[in-house]
């Protein structure tokens, strides 16, 4: 019988990372539904576009893998020039590191002893690992654990942009924590700051988003200046996301952008305006849930085999790809009822259809594999190796 | 390189079923958070109470495993007297059958060839397997596939209670399908009817729930009488759930009740009134999400490490177990911000707290294991073997 630590380690060792190739080409519509599918041409265009945009502006791309949870995708992003990845949790970092990803930033603070131990275990063999801290208490605990293990841990101080979710207050409180780390935490290596204003990402108007975001981030700039005036260099300033990727270089505060959703896109991000128009089309939806029509109890309605267990339901309702005149309605854990108002194509029992996801991150977290395809033909199957890693 | 069918079969073969015991007793609070935990004393009382209630009334309990997705729990329910289980999807049935559960009813119709093949593969070695059908088209396809495989498949006709989700219209349309199965589908064995009025389960007033439900189910009774008058016996009538468990015997329509949530309960079910009071307390919450306090950026608020990736967000907000005067607010994929209005106990950074889930089914589907405990001490760990099986 295992210890708890051994049980957790054993289960992690069973996680698969490698892309799977099938013996022969098959049609996307042969995949059992509901299935999470990636249109590779669009996906790759999204990856290229974000990388080249940020590279041109001299900004680093630190891809947030909490969105895709897939080492195969992380490796593709790094191969295109991303400087590294983020994870939200230590268990995600364990998966990414085991799959060969080195430069990892954990963007959420830890507080409990067991998680600090797991973090230090990773840091022992990975000197590119970084984590945010937002309290003297946690910094002290982390420093002790790292010192005991004979390693150092890279640190960003997490600044609260006013959301009250995580982070220490900018300016004086942050500087006090910075000095504490400099003066008392020899096993912590201060790398810089993080300030993620998540509540700005979806402001549905570009100018308003830009102005609100700039005002909030100004305190980050001032905090950096206080650090530097105090003799604490700030080589890294991490934050931002898909919603602010084209604002960051104008502000000149961040050194790296934590974008994630741009690779897949979703309805939530489509609905924010872009710099040039009312729909955010800088990146195109590349992720879909393939569903089957399984029943038609009433005329003008048809039921698909996909409900809240395979489509995140925290945001708007799902929409169909390239079908107009129909409305998806949630119908419980396992089903959606589609109102056929004036469908732009005929929809029949047994048909397979693609749904654009309302919110990509939690939708991905419901599935075990990405089925990737090009021109309607299945290519590789990619394990979502860090699915369920909320720990 | 595998075929697609082999890939799916291989992954199913890797699923673990067995309960895991650790080497020595540890405290529940040593479990890494967020974690799905079961308070065994309450859980077992819930199982006993539902079984004894229905047994006394002469009704069968057919536990819906779409809720817990766990063969260990299914076996416990059957050991207490349940006549069998339901699954929502064929991939769940594959897991339950592989884990040794025999009497399985799939409560949602299939329409695609690949799923019909998978169903027939199960039926070849399990003559207790049953599935609902709601169209002549599907019945015909299923009959052909079963005949080709040399097996028979048990069938319930699914009646639409008016929700328009799945099911054929009661009365004439249903009888026509029944005659078609009798006359033309030698490889289908007609067992009876299913009518699941899911939208009645959460009517928040007992008398209203009872009256509405009775009116809807009356068409089910009439349909059964039409079948019997036509010489088609209806030995099984399946439906109902936790919200109507104590109404069924008075109506005398069902022969078996498809209850699931009673084992864990959730906020959604707590909020429907019971026969005797404004809160439904016939069964008590036994399932919780254990979370850690990880940050406190602002006074009067504190942040926990559990957001919509480990708590289903389709219904009400989470509540804390045995803590009054605090309010959980969703704070994205990974976090919740807890407003400390007038907390009935002190809450500090690093504390571990239990959350009552808003909606048990989709919350379970986010996790890989149940950590079971008694008196604060961890007992077995149960794999959620059918997690993610929406196919």
Image (spheres, coloured by chain):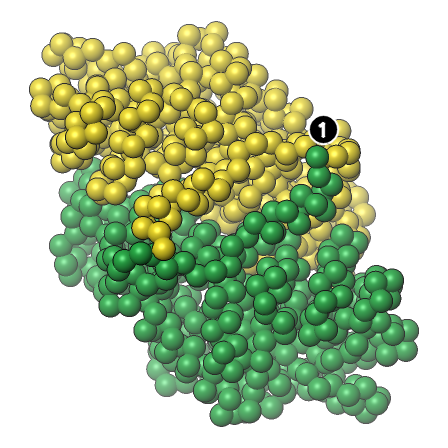
Chain colours: A yellow, B green
Residue in view at x 84 percent, y 71 percent = B187
Establish if B106 lies above or below A199. Answer: below
Specify whether A283 is left or right of B127. left
Q: Pinpoint residue B230: horizontal percent, then vertical percent.
A: 84, 88
Residue at the extreme right? B184
Residue B150, picture quadrant: bottom right
Q: Is residue A211 visible?
A: no
**At 15% from the left edge and 61% from the top edge, which residue is drawn?**
B344
Q: Is residue B38 above or below residue B16?
A: below
- Which residue is label 1 attached to? A374
Task: State whether residue A256 appears in this view.
Answer: yes
Q: In this image, B390 relative to A215: left or right?
A: right
Q: Nearer the viewer, residue A82 or B375?
A: B375
Eyeballing the image, is A222 above or below B288? above
The quadrant of the picture occupied by the C terminus of chain A is top left
**What is the chain letter for disc 1?**
A
x, y (%) of residue B234?
74, 85
Q: Quadrant of residue A85?
A: top left
- Residue at the (25%, 43%) spot, across then down: A114
Which of the two residues, B155 or A142, is positioned nearer the viewer here?
A142
Q: Is residue B233 left or right of residue A250?
A: right
In this view of the protein, which residue sits in the foreground, A24 or A308?
Answer: A24
Q: Left or right? Give the position of B334 relative to B228.
A: left
In the figure, A314 relative to A227: above or below? below
Percent from the top left, x then y, of residue A92?
A: 40, 36
Q: Label 1: few (<14), some or many (≥20) within 10 Å? A: some
Q: Position of residue A379 (x, y in %)?
A: 70, 31
């Amino acid at each position: 019988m295992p210890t708890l630590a051994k049980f957790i380690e054993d289960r992690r060792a069973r996680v698969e990372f490698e892309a799977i190739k099938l013996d022969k080409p098959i049609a996307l519509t042969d995949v059992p539904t509901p299935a999470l599918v990636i249109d590779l041409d669009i996906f790759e265009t999204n990856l290229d576009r974000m990388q080249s945009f940020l590279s041109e502006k001299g900004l680093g791309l630190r891809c947030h893998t909490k969105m895709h949870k897939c080492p195969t995708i992380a490796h593709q992003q790094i191969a295109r020039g991303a400087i590294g990845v983020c994870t939200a949790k230590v268990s995600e970092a364990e998966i990414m590191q085991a799959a060969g990803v080195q430069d990892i930033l954990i963007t959420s603070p830890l507080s409990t002893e067991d998680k600090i131990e797991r973090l230090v275990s990773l840091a022992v063999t990975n000197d590119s690992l970084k984590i945010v801290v937002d309290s003297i208490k946690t910094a002290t605990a982390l420093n002790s654990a790292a010192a005991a293990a004979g390693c150092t841990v890279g640190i960003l101080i997490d600044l609260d942009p006013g959301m009250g979710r995580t982070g220490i207050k900018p300016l004086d409180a942050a500087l006090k924590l910075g000095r504490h780390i400099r003066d008392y935490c020899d096993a912590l290596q201060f790398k810089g700051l993080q300030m993620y204003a998540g509540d700005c990402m979806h402001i549905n108007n570009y100018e308003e988003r830009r102005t609100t975001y700039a005002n909030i981030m100004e305190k980050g700039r001032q905090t950096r200046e206080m650090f530097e005036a105090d003799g604490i260099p700030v080589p890294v300033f991490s934050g931002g996301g898909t919603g602010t990727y084209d604002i960051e270089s104008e502000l000149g505060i961040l050194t790296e952008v934590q974008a994630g959703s741009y690779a897949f896109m979703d309805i939530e991000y489509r609905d924010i305006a872009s710099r040039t128009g009312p729909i955010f089309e800088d990146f195109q939806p590349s992720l879909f849930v393939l569903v089957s029509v399984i029943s038609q109890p009433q005329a003008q309605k048809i039921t698909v085999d996909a409900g809240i267990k395979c489509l995140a339901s925290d945001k708007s309702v799902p929409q169909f790809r390239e079908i107009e005149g129909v409305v998806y309605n949630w119908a419980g854990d396992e089903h959606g009822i589609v109102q056929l108002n004036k469908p732009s194509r005929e929809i029949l029992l047994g048909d397979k259809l693609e749904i654009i996801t309302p919110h990509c991150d939690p939708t991905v977290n419901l599935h075990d594999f990405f089925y990737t395809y090009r021109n309607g033909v299945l290519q590789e199957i990619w394990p979502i190796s860090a699915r369920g890693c909320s720990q």
